[in-house]
Amino acid sequence: MDTVTGVALPDEAELRRRVDRLSLEQKIRLLTGEDFWALYAEPDAGLRRLVLSDGPAGVRGQSWDERDSSANVPSATALAATWDTGRIEAIGGLLAREARRKGVDVLLAPTVNLHRTPYGGRCFECFSEDPLLTARIGAAYVRGLQRSGVGATVKHFVGNDSETQRMTVDVRIDDRTLRELYLVPFEAIVREEGAWAVMAAYNGVNGSPMTQSPLLRDILHGEWGYDGLVMSDWTAAHATEATAQAALDLAMPGPASQYGPWGDALLEAVGKGAVDQALIDDKVVRILRLAARVGALTDVPAPPAPATSEPDSVAVAQELRAAAAAGFVLARNDGILPLSRPGSPGRLGPDRRLRVALIGPNAEVARTLGGGSATVFPPYTISPLDGLRAAGLHVTYAPGVTSHLRAGAARAPWLLRPGRPFDPGTGAEIRYFAESGELAGWELRDGATFLWLSGFASSGVTEPVARLEIRCVIRATVGGAYQLGVSGLGRYRLLVDGAEVFDATLVLPEDTDIGEALMRPPQQGVPVDLAAGQSVDVVAEHDVASSPFAGFGTLVQLNLVPPHGTDDEEIAAAAAMAAASDAAVVVVGTTAEVESEGFDRTTLALPGRQDELVRRVIAANPRTVAVVNSGAPVLLPWAQDAAAVLLSWFGGQEYGDALADVLLGDVEPGGRLPMTWPASEEGLPSTQPADGVLTYHEGLFIGYRAYDRDGREPLFPFGHGSGYTTWSHESITLDCAPDGRKWTGRGVAACVQVRNTGSRPGREVVQVYASRPDSAVERPAKWLAGFATADAEPGETVTVGILIPERAFQHWDGQGWATEPGSFVLAAGPSSASLPLTTRVELP
Ligand code: BGC
């Protein structure tokens, strides 16, 4: 009986009987994917095709296609900022429903690598700098998915905490740091939730690539008793024998004739005795066990399928809107928030409509998710501009500056499909041509960015494609110079009204990461002067084989930069607009060029002249709220001058509505920082390997552990944030009975009493940190040991029970977990920098 779904599953012996029915060829065939996203069916074992999909901000499904939309949940950082495991478990349930709607069995999520440094390109996709918070939020995410019969893939095991040279880098992590930081989330999720799949990372750790690392067998299998499947990250497996001997079960993607080191080479290795057959059998058992869990064994009852709902349904919208607001961190507020609603008896008077100047590039086109494999295509996105307008505010908008340093994809209102004068729609027509020059297929698309992974089958074209044509109409809204162009790799021709404007081959250095190649490809563009209302036919042609990545994927993006003022002009216009308004809301943030898979950040500064923009707006109107739309920390050198600072992450498809809810006070900003927000770039660990090696010199001291040790002040400390009410932290007692029941587990039960001293109902995140004064062992000054959320009405006092596990008092002594006898301090409060309550725990 599976403890998660309550479904009777075949036991080990039954799985082995199925394996025994297969020939060696059949077994080995199962160990590499059938294609980019699926495993082979094997009727002789009762196995149907099993489908995997990215993750983690939604369930993309088997194609990279804007027409195949998915509910877009807030970024991992936003989810962690809720500190609310119940809410995250519910989000896991929503993702399970999405998975089932899209025919997906296993989600390639959550990402539980740590924010070792904010430069990490995928920090937005990872929860936190703290192992315990990552473990708790990650476990809740996995619970929500697996309870509904959809597998989770905990990734990337381990040490993939940055992107630079990620496919080859050897990460050196000392044993204690590995155990006490980087393995913690994997261990907790594997042991507590029995994760059904783990993804082995691209990088190596301490000398072995993770797809052939002894850590898989020794720690994951051996110490943690893991019975799930280990798959490689995409193309991460290389050596045939070493990966087969290690506890890697599945090489992705497939087929083996195209990718990965197994297939015939593994057959040969087994034939000559270099790889034991028993290892192959064990891998197949694990594939079948995963299949049984997700209901992919045709003769075994599947777990009850969750009801599906459309990604644009009211129920999904409500849940995502509430989740986004629950993760917003109000880092600073001089009292300006919540803004008075029009007509409410606020300081602006009952009969005046609040005039808000909404400013900033991300206010009109918000980032709702980060780039790379985490990309999904939401059915719609609500920008801050949409959200504030829908809330009934009198909003004026100015972009302020251009934050994209590269040309962006063509979009509405300029981008139109060709040949449909009465119902043009936004998008393009794509024509696929075979080697013979014959048309092999065509389709209408909704955007201007097109990526095909491993052939064109996702567009219904099965014969080999030699050439692509992307056809659209660009219509000028105002007269001026429009920059037209393409992004991609290989040869592209661009024609405007039938005349060639360029024929260029776009190249990247040979060792460029595939993620970077696809997310930040080279560009070519030309200015084209258009009169207001003028339309031109635009055709971009691409020779598929001309791209060095053609075997992996083909990318064409049609770019358009409409005429815009200079930054000087736009900043002046924004400041004037702010001066003439009751309040200004400036939405600043990063772009896909900055936060994406495949590369790290090289600066934490906001791109373009956004800092200058904020300063000018604050100078024009001191009632300025700065909203930060980034997946991870950026420098905010003006933070102390803004009336309020709201850190809102990549907020998912309902971002703008959630923002309106919070700015107007209909909903509390519920978040607390899941990482330390730096004031400067001083003292942050580097992501840059030296001679292929990245040494984690800082050891245990990442995030707040480093700030504490060095006595440095961040801009906002770990755990910081407030809602719209105030709290007093009254008392902490130990060995209490949280929820009226005496806790009998290993560890300590702490009860913390908090009182809502404000005038609104609210939710507080009560945090408990452990420390060990005068320790004989080198330790951080303090570390997160437990947390809980408390809901209270104005004036109400509530007590939350926080279970501090035994592990919180242990350290890795090189051989195992050890507890230093004597006294530990537990300190509780609203953030790592404010811990008014303390007590002591005596350990034998
Ligand atoms: C990423 C994984 C992802 C996989 C499949 C890899 O490049 O590192 O996180 O799941 O691609 O898209």
Image (cartoon, rainbow, N blue to C red):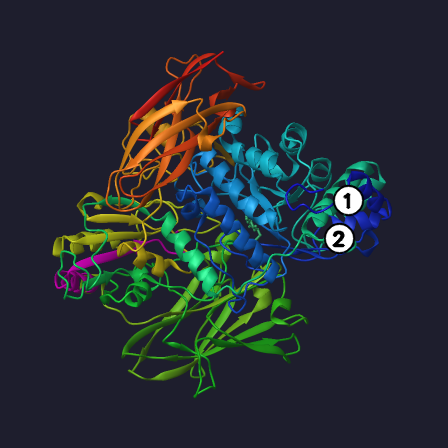
Query: Does residue 571 belong to the magenta stretch?
Result: yes
Say which residue label 1 marks. Answer: 10
Which percent across, then down, holds residue 91?
49, 51
Of all residues, the one furthest to the bottom in this rendering is 422
Crowd rating for badge 2 (residues with CA inside 10 Å; few <14, some 14–19, many 20+): many
Is residue 550 in view from this perspective?
no
- Residue, x 17% and y 58% (percent of image)? 583
Q: In this view, does 697 lie to the left or right of 170?
A: left
Q: Quadrant of residue 157?
A: top right
Mark 1 close to ligand 1, CB under 8 Å: no
Q: Earlier in the sequence, mark 1 or mark 2?
A: 1
Q: How many labels does the image show?
A: 2
Residue closest to the eye, 547 or 12 = 12
Crowd rating for badge 1 (residues with CA inside 10 Å; few <14, some 14–19, many 20+): some
Q: In which quarter of the image is residue 349?
A: bottom left
Above or below for 199 versus 360: above
Q: Quadrant of the N terminus?
A: top right
- Residue, x 28% and y 82% (percent of image)? 532
Q: Is mark 1 on a helix, strand or loop?
A: loop
Query: Does residue 197 belong to the magenta stretch?
Result: no
Marks 1 & 2, CB-CB < 8 Å contact: yes
Which percent across, then down, holds residue 20?
86, 44
Q: Is mark 2 on a helix, strand or loop?
A: loop
Say which residue label 2 marks. Answer: 297
Residue closest to the eye, 832 or 280 = 832
Q: In this view, does 633 lie to the left or right of 503?
A: left
Task: State which region is magenta.
Answer: 570-594
Tell me the kind of residue under disc 1: Pro
Which percent across, then down, holds residue 487?
45, 64
Which percent across, then down, holds residue 485?
41, 70
Tell me the kind of residue under disc 2: Leu
- Residue, x 45% and y 64% (percent of image)? 314
